[in-house]
Each structure stands twice: as C-alpha cells, then as structure tokens.
Image: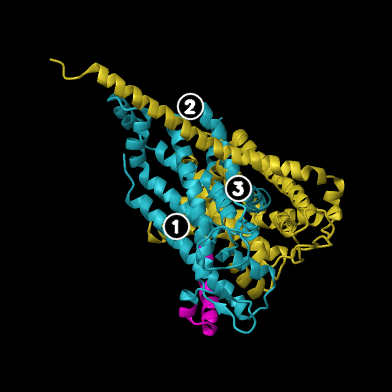
C-alpha cells in the first residue's frame, strides 16, 4: 500500500517535471501569441492595403486629369475618344439619387416596423417576424437587381408611362427594400434596450402605447436609431449590383429620377466588365471613383459610430 | 370641489386610444409590407424559373442559346471558391478573435484593431474588388484565378467572422478557464482544449453565415474580371472559373426575354444553396450551442 502511494507521488512529480522539461510545449506557448498577433495584424494590413491601393492609383489618375476638373466637372464622358471628360459630379448625383430614394422607402418603413416589433408585437409574433427580416437581409444583391429590372421597373412603368427601362426610381426603391431589415433590426435593438421601468412609468400616468412609443422610447433610443439609418444609407451608397442592373450607364447631371443614371459603383462595374486595358486613364479612373466612394462610406460609418457613442442614453 | 371633469377626461382618453389604434395599424402595415416584398420576390422568381430547372440545366455549360444554357461551371466554381474562402477566412478570423479575447491587453493598439475591424465591415464590397485587383491579381500575378477571388472574398468576410468568433469566445465562462489553469494547464492548452471546443458551435454558425454572404457576392468578382461564360471546369486553384451570381448577372443583362427565365432558374439554384447553408448554421446553433 505505502510503497504504491510513494510510487504514485513520484510519478506525479515526474509527470510535472516531464511536462516542465518538454521543450515543444514551451516553444508553442511562446510561439502561438506571435502567430495570433500576425493574424490579427492581417485585418489592419487589409485596411492599409485598401487605402494605399486607392491612393497610389488615384495619384496616377491625377497625373493625367486635374483634380479640379474631377471634383467640379459636371460631365462624365470617359469613353468619348477624342476628348474624354472626367467630372465626377454626375456619378455622385446618381449615387445620391438612388440613396435618397432608398432612404425615403426604408427609413419610415424600417422605423415603423421597429416600433411595431418592440412596442406592440407579442413575443410570438416577434419570433416569427424577426427571422423573416433576417432572410430578407440575406438575399444576395444580384437577386434584388434582377427583381428591380424585371418586376419593379415594368410595374412602375404602368404607373409612370414616361419612365425609362433604366432609371433611378426602381433601383432606389429596391435598394430601400434591401436596407430596410438593417434599419428595422438595429432600431429595434436600440428600442428594446430602453428599460421597461421607464415605459411602465409613462403607462402608469395614463399614456397610451403610442404616446409611450413616440414620446418616451423613441427619444431615448434616438442615437441608436439615427446611427442605424446612417449605416444603412452608407450601405445604399456602396450598393453595386442593383444599380448596375437597373440603373443604367448614362451619367447625367440632372435631377429627374425617371431617366437612366450611373452611380459610382455602376461605373466601376461597367469599366471592369468591359476589359479596360491596364494602364489607361480609364483604368485608373475606377480607382479615383472607388476612392471617392470609400471616403463617402467611411465618413458615414465614422459618423454613425460617433452618434451612437456620443448621444447614447445610459441607464 | 372637483378639479377633474370626468366626462372631458373620458372623451379625450377615447380619442387618444383611437389615435393609438390607428397608428398601431399603420405600424403593422409597414411591417407587413416588408414581409410582402419578400413573398412577391420569391413567388416571382419561382414562377419564372421553375420551368427551366431540369437535369440539363445542371449539366450544361453557359451558352448563347437560352435552351442550352446551364449552370454546371458556375455551380462547381462557387463550390471551389467556398473551399478557398472557408479555411483562409476562418484561420485568420478565429486567430484574430483568440488574440483579441485571450491574449491582448486593453490598450490603444487593441482598441485600434477593434475599431479597424468595425470600419472594415462597412467598406463596400466593390472596394475590396479594387484591392484584390491590385494586390492579388496584378502584384501577386494570380490573375483571374480561384485563388485571387478566394483571397479577396476572405478579406471581405473577415470582419464578420472575427466579430462572430469574438462573441462565441466571450460567451465561454471565466470559471472554465480558471478550472483549467487550476489543473495545471498552460494558456495554449486551455485555449485549444477548453475555450475553443466550447466556442466552436458559435464560431461555425457565424462563419457559415458569413460564407453564405460571400457565395452571393458579385461585385468584387466583376472588378477582378472573372469571366462569365466558361466551357470547362476549373482544374486547379490557379485556373479560371465562374460563379453563380456572375452567371446570373450575365443572363439578367441580356436583352432576350428567355434569358430572364434562365436567370430566374439560376437564382433558384443560388437561393437553394444559401438555404442549405443557413439551415446547417441554424442546426448547429440549436443542436450544439451551450448556454452557461
């Protein structure tokens, strides 16, 4: 008995000693954090890669086209052989048209859906509707583009006979449908995080559910709601396939929404699928447009982060 | 003396309740409109595409003729693409998450990485395409290959996987780690034998959802110049290929009406693939996810 116990003790000590002496383990303990830091650094490298790629190629573009012509020009005619014009404003206007229409569709509907889900719907209804909204958010954009081109545009043409096949209205509405789930679910999160005690306080002094929703919950959740809208609009600005399929390829500096347009993203797609030769001005122009797009979306994302941090109500 | 006139209060209350009911109906209609959009979209695509969905459609390559057009190359290409994206993005994403959750101290550098990840998630996919075109396709001479597209897409979904993995790792209770240390395990042993096994269902669920986003993504591939119509199957990581969304994009662009039906049939295949992937993710979440 006793000798066995001693043996066991020894073996445990030996085991500990063995494991201490294992060189491989020591190396792994030291090595793994380093490897993990490298993987973590890849995400930083990606950002650096994006920024440097865009800056270098855009710089090359501005060797050939003057910055003022690019920023303030109102004509975007890169393919006119003799005298190409690179004024980015029509592309920006096209992008803004689509985004504004999308916001007009998605903001009221999205916030209304969020109010319904967070303030009125029963748990059971919420458990059915929220996954459906997730499905809506998971539909690939190419499918939405096809839907805009083959269903929404013909439908709108019956209402507005002057509507062209390619226009800003139809992709705008469909982009709105695409970003709706994002606004609805992020706003719903913001509203659900308003504590129940505040709601109950308002109900106790005789407020109706609507008054609670509009005068108590909405103001308290406003920072979250606004940042969800900003994020969604930033997504609309960067949206590519819907506008390439249904928006057309004619950049123009007009404010009507029934004619063909071109957005920044759609221009990049047009040039890429047309095989522009490497090193031509047109080739570099997609980086300049991409850089412009990147600045738009980045500043909107930073704005959304700022709003949600700065104006958050803490409970 | 009464300060409150009951009849006036009741009258006002009634009208306020009416307004409440009215707006409740408006909110409900708004919610239903979103659901209606999904239903219309699905019905439209099913009714357009179903008749073109047959064995030949799966077995034919792309074609200029609608009747002969098939999806074989695109479907195989999409699956090959996934085989590149899944390991690359998961190794990078989970590695980053482990570093941030288990090793990194809260300092400015960590905050910077975290902020960088959330901003990267908001970069439009087409910009990732420009990155891939310059870095992978031109500088590393990968051209229009599966590898170039796969690496580009991996970076695109990397932020999503990192965040999902971070949440899964954070959900493993501290006591389990401490118990492991108490038994004499080292940090790396604790991570590989305690934390990761507990976090794997959450990581997998998030990764599959991110992967399904990559499968449906089109814009970066267009920028990379991935060809649309191919008459052969890819035979290595460096060969040219095409994917489902690209093939659908090409069909949808064509002016002939028949190609709209072919595009709809392609969409059914793509959506079917996504439904399968999402079901697997939900199954893993419900079956294996532990709650502490």
Q: CA distance from mark 3 to mark 1?
A: 36 Å
Whether B150 is drawn above or below A157: the answer is below
Whether A71 is drawn above or below B41: the answer is below
Circle on res. B88: none
Q: Which chain is cyan?
A: A
> Chief secondary structure of the magenta span?
helix
The question of residue A246 being in magenta is answered with: no
In the rendered image, residue A195, in percent from the top left (x then y), is placed at: 35, 34
**Tag 1: Cα neighbours inside 10 Å, few (<14), some, or many (≥20)?**
many
Pointer 3 with pointer 2, Cβ within 8 A: no
Region in magenta = A44-69
In the rendered image, residue A239, in percent from the top left (x then y), is placed at: 56, 57
Q: Is residue B42 left or right of residue A240?
A: right
Whether B288 is drawn above or below A206: the answer is below
Q: Nearer the viewer, residue B145 or A27?
A: B145
Q: Which chain is yellow?
A: B
Q: Nearer the viewer, residue B278 or A217?
A: A217
Quadrant showing the N terminus of chain B: top left
Q: Is residue B71 left or right of residue A244?
A: right
The answer to whether residue B268 shows anywhere in this view is yes
Q: CA distance from mark 1 to mark 2?
A: 33 Å
**Tag 3: Cα neighbours inside 10 Å, few (<14), some, or many (≥20)?**
few
């Amino acid at each position: 008995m006793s000798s066995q116990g001693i043996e066991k003790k020894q073996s445990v000590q030996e085991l500990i000693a063995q494991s201490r002496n294992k060189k491989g383990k020591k190396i792994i303990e030291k090595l793994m954090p380093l490897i993990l830091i490298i993987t973590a650094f890849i995400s930083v490298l990606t950002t650096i890669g994006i920024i440097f790629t865009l800056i270098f190629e855009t710089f090359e573009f501005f060797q050939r086209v003057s910055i003022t012509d690019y920023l303030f020009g109102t004509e975007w005619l890169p393919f006119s052989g003799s005298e190409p014009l690179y004024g980015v404003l029509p592309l920006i206007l096209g992008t803004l048209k689509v985004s504004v229409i999308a916001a007009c569709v998605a903001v009221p509907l999205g916030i209304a859906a969020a109010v319904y889900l967070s303030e009125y719907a029963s748990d059971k209804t919420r458990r059915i509707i929220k996954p459906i909204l997730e499905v809506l958010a998971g539909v690939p954009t190419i499918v939405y583009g096809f839907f805009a081109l083959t269903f929404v545009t013909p439908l709108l043409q019956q209402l507005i006979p002057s509507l062209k096949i390619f226009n800003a209205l139809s992709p705008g509405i469909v982009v709105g449908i695409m970003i709706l789930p994002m606004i609805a679910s992020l706003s719903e999160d913001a509203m659900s995080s308003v504590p129940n005690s505040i709601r109950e306080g308002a109900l106790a002094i005789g407020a109706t559910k609507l008054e609670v929703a509009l005068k108590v919950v909405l103001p308290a959740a406003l920072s979250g709601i606004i940042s969800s809208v900003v994020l969604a609009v930033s997504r609309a600005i960067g949206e590519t396939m819907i506008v390439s399929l249904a928006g057309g390829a004619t950049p123009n500096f007009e404010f009507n929404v029934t004619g063909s347009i071109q957005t920044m993203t759609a221009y990049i797609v047009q040039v890429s699928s047309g095989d522009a030769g490497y090193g031509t001005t047109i080739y570099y122009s997609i980086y300049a447009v991409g850089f412009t797009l990147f600045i738009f979306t980045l500043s909107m994302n930073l704005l959304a982060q700022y709003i949600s941090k700065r104006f958050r109500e803490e409970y | 003396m009464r300060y409150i006139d009951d009849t006036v209060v009741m009258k006002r209350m009634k009208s306020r309740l009416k307004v409440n009911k009215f707006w409740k109906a408006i909110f409900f209609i708004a919610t239903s409109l979103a659901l209606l959009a999904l239903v219309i979209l699905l019905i439209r695509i099913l009714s357009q595409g179903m008749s073109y969905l047959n064995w030949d459609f799966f077995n034919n390559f792309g074609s200029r003729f609608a009747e002969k057009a098939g999806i074989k190359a695109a479907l195989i290409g999409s699956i090959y693409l996934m085989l590149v994206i899944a390991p690359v993005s998961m190794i990078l994403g989970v590695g980053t998450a482990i570093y941030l959750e288990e090793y990194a101290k809260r300092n400015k550098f960590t905050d910077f990485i975290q902020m960088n990840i959330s901003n990267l998630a908001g970069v439009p996919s087409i910009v990732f395409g420009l990155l891939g075109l310059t870095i992978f396709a031109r500088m590393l001479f990968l051209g229009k290959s599966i590898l170039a597209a796969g690496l580009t897409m991996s970076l695109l979904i990397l932020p999503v996987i990192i965040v999902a993995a971070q949440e899964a790792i954070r959900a493993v209770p501290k006591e389990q780690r401490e118990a492991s240390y108490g038994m004499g395990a080292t940090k790396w042993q604790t991570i590989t034998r305690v934390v990761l096994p507990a976090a794997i269902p959450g990581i997998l669920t998030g990764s599959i959802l991110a992967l399904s986003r990559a499968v449906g993504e089109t814009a970066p591939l267009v920028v990379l110049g991935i060809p649309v119509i191919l008459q052969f199957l890819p035979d290595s990581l460096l060969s040219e290929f095409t994917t489902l969304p690209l093939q659908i994009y090409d069909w949808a662009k064509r002016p002939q009406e028949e190609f709209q039906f072919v595009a709809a049939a392609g969409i059914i295949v793509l959506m079917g693939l996504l439904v399968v992937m999402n079901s697997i993710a939900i199954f893993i979440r419900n079956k294996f996810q532990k709650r502490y």
